[in-house]
Image: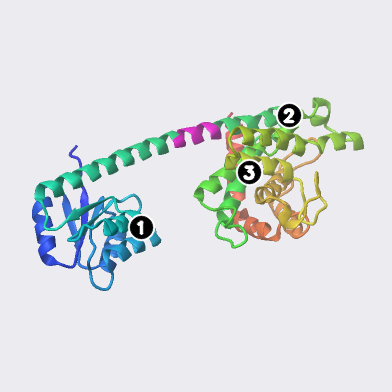
Amino acid sequence: MEKPRAKILVIDDTKTNIDVLDGILSMDYDIYVALNGEKGIMLTDKIHPDLILLDVMMPEMDGYETLRQLHERNILRDTPVIFLTAKADAKSEQTGLDLGAVDYITKPFNPSLVKLRIKNQLDLKFQRDHLNDLVDEKTADIRKTMKVMLTSLGSLAEYRDPETGEHIRRTQIIVQKLAEQLKDHPRFSMYIKSIEYIDYYATAAPLHDIGKVGIHDEILRKPGKLTETERSIMMMHPKMGYDVLLQATKELNGNPMVRIAADMALGHHEHWDGNGYPNHLKGDQIPVGARMMAVADVYDALVSRRPYKEPYSYDVAVNEIKNGSGKQFDPDIVEAFLKIAPELPLIYEQFDEKEKAS
């Protein structure tokens, strides 16, 4: 497969300069032209050139200001910029290099030097791009490995408490859908900053009950009602899970996904009105992930069969969540839940089909 030709954008108000550069470079590269700084900025955003040749002396917006604007508008990315100038004094060069230019080409143009300098800068750019691709690929592999490990770790709690069935996978889907609903909400956008963060919350969700691994089977698997002492022990599982995951965040240099998982484990039994446990947090004191997990956890428990109860109907369960708004649950998260609630019966039906098939 033939390698695509590099794109070079020439920003220069003098047609003679453009014609000369086109004659020197067009055999090897695709040449684009802008006759002033503003058009150069627009074209940069549109075509994403591999290299920019930028004239210093232009009316209205000179080359220095054009480069400043390219940086301010955050559209330059990693594109190298070479200034074109008739005066190559040290002060001018320093100004351009301080602004982020990689080189200067002086006028009148020497064709062999122009070609060599452009080739060198493009070679460097393509090497950087290749290294960045390798880093991105390795980072994606590491993230994928971590997701698998975290999901597997979360499954430990399920094996200890077999009555939960597909609980962690169903709640994971609900948390993901809640995060998708809330990412543009003004109260939550700083916590759900991107699609990547939606993935963090969904990946962390299976770990919410990891602390149950530390609860004795006699309590965890007891079919009847717990005594006060047993209930006190059971209520320790959020802190147990948090301690394990908090240590992991230190080992992983504060990895945001594990940090979210730790907060989710600790806070998913806290209540919006402060009547939850273990720390009786209230309102926005409760981490966002824990607030989403609380809604997902309770809904799934309501519609699931347990040794001590039959499953509630979809309508009854949704109504219970609705009634908990402002008391057990963050009202805005309940509102988001009500938007996704119509999708849940089909999702749960698909899980039932998987369980029957297995």
Judged by depth in the image, the label closer to the viewer, 1 or 3, is 1
Is there CB contact under 8 Å for labels 2 and 3?
no
Of 21 and 135, which appears nearest the observer?
Answer: 21
Image quadrant holding the N terminus, namely top left
Judged from this view, the residue extending furthest toward the bottom is 60
Instruction: Indicate which disc, 1 or 2, sits on the residue closer to the N terminus.
Output: 1
**Residue on which the image places disc 3:** 260
Q: Is residue 39 visible?
A: yes
Real-space Cα separation, disc 2 to disc 3, in angstroms: 19 Å
Of the residues shown, which amino acid type is indicated by label 3?
Answer: Ile
Q: Is residue 225 visible?
A: no
Is 61 drawn above or below residue 5 in the view shown? below
Determine crowd level at label 3: few under 14, some 14-19, many 20+ residues with C-alpha closer than 10 A. many
Position of 105 with respect to 205 (left or right) is left
Question: Which residue shows up at 27% across the image and 73% down it?
Answer: 60
Dominant SS type (magenta): helix
Position of 218 with respect to 86 (left or right) is right
In the image, the segment drawn in magenta is 139-147
Determine crowd level at label 1: few under 14, some 14-19, many 20+ residues with C-alpha closer than 10 A. some
Could you say whether the residue bearing mark 1 is in a helix, strand or loop? loop
Is 134 drawn above or below residue 6 in the view shown? above
**Residue on which the image places disc 1:** 75
**Residue on which the image places disc 2:** 213
Of the residues shown, which amino acid type is indicated by label 1?
Answer: Ile
Of 333 and 356, which appears nearest the observer?
Answer: 333
Is 223 drawn above or below residue 103 in the view shown? above
